[in-house]
Amino acid sequence: MSDGRQFEELVGEYYEPLYQFAYTLTREAAGACDLVQQTFCVWAAKGHQLRDGTKVKTWLFTTLHREFLGSRRRQTRFPHMDLEGAETELPVVEPVATSRLDTERLLATLAALDEVYQAPVALFYLQDYSYQEIAEILGVPLGTVKSRLARGLDRLHGMLEGPQAWNLKKQTNPEYKTL
Amino acid sequence: MNREDVKNVLGIYRPGSPDELDPEVREALGQARQDPELAQWLQDHGRRQVQIRQQLQRITVPAGLKERILAEHQAREKIIPWPSLRYWLAAAAVVAVLVGLPFWLRTNLRSSTDFAKYQTEMAAVALRGYAMELNTHDAGAIRQYLGQHQAPDDFVLPGGLQQAVVAGCAIESWQGRKAAMVCFRTGQPLPAGAESDLWLFVIDQGAVADAPANGRPVVAKINRLSVATWSQAGKLYVLSTTANAGVLQKFL
């Protein structure tokens, strides 16, 4: 099989899940498309260095995440700020039942999470990755992934339940006060 | 585990996923299934996980993204067709080695045997017969003739050889360089028709790649000749005779 054919098959298999992951990180289509394109561009240049063929998917997601982090570092228009002080800028999430959630509202809530929780939570839901694989993609220890997932999911669910439930949770759990 | 512990562990549990392989999750699941309150919580939690997952998986990919990726890849391939610049450089290096190797081998193999070949060839000149270009007993005339023909003329004769009778000279060629051939007589009876029986070959030291460094003469036997070789002051000297090595030593 030619290199071109292999590349086309690879793109066909992974461009959709990669885009979905990229979109949860960027929340805008153009940025997500750029990330996916850049990921395959890196693959074309360096993919031959990957010895273990079973790691292709992990490699692609790892590369996409690194590209995202790199692009974020280059941008200065996304200053980090504590959620406590930015509540007025958060998307308005109506207290709706999750059964009536729409994707955009869910993404808006996901984006309101601290950055360290966004990627693990997105990978957790989008892919059937094990905790270990998520750890490999993000380049953090397994225990860190589990704790970030636990906190990230808890906060996501709390915010989805509505401001009242979320405020109550913050009051009863001092850990959330710094979120 | 108490109920809170179980909830904490199962908070990151996805029904029907590899999470169940995690020992801690497996233990918490077992405990939750035996506790009606936890079982209800787990059911609700699982339903919510599935709903969130389904919502995120509804993110739709913009039309044409795949085609854009492939087109961009093809454009890059046209710039650097096969399969990357790195391979071209590697291929160029291989070609360079293949082209250069014979030349390198020829040069180096020749160099490694230059001296031996030079000795053998000069010995062959002495043995197979030669025509002296200048017949004279005048050493000065010989130097002058050699100098006029761009052959080495500033050679230094060893003390013994200065006492020998000079008979004439000729000029030989070695790989495009001129070698002076000065003919002497040992004083022993000459074979019939012979005009000399002791020959000194002088060439610039740099003309022979592996010429010996300056030092005392080394005597060897080449074919029927006794041969002494040495280098001095930028010249390579080969003195040969049909007489034995003992006779040769007298002229060094």
Image (cartoon, coloured by chain):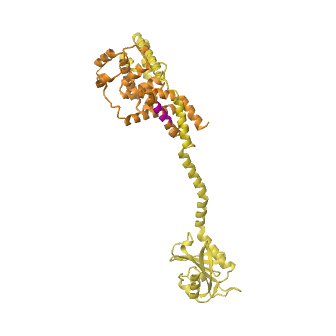
Q: Where are the magenta residues, as a range?
A: A33-40
Location of residue A177 (image quadrant): top left
Residue at figure coordinates x 29%, y 17% from the top left: A172
Image colour assigned to chain B: yellow
Location of residue A161 (image quadrant): top left
Residues A103 and B35: in front is A103
Q: Position of residue A86 (x, y in %)?
A: 30, 25
Rendered view: B204 above or below B42: below
Q: Position of residue B37 (x, y in %)?
A: 39, 10
Q: Position of residue B184 (x, y in %)?
A: 61, 85
Q: Residue furthest right?
A: B192
Rendered view: B33 above or below B73: above
- Magenta run includes residue B182: no
Q: Position of residue B3 (x, y in %)?
A: 37, 15
Q: Taking B185 as reference, is B1 left or right?
A: left
Residue at figure coordinates x 44%, y 24% from the top left: A124
Q: Taking B87 as reference, is A132 left or right?
A: left
Quadrant in which the C terminus of chain B is drawn: bottom right
Write down which chain is painted orange. Answer: A
Q: Residue furthest bottom?
A: B137
Rendered view: B244 above or below A101: below
- Magenta run includes residue A34: yes
Q: Residue furthest top?
A: B36
Residue at figure coordinates x 69%, y 80% from the top left: B129
Rendered view: B76 above or below B48: below
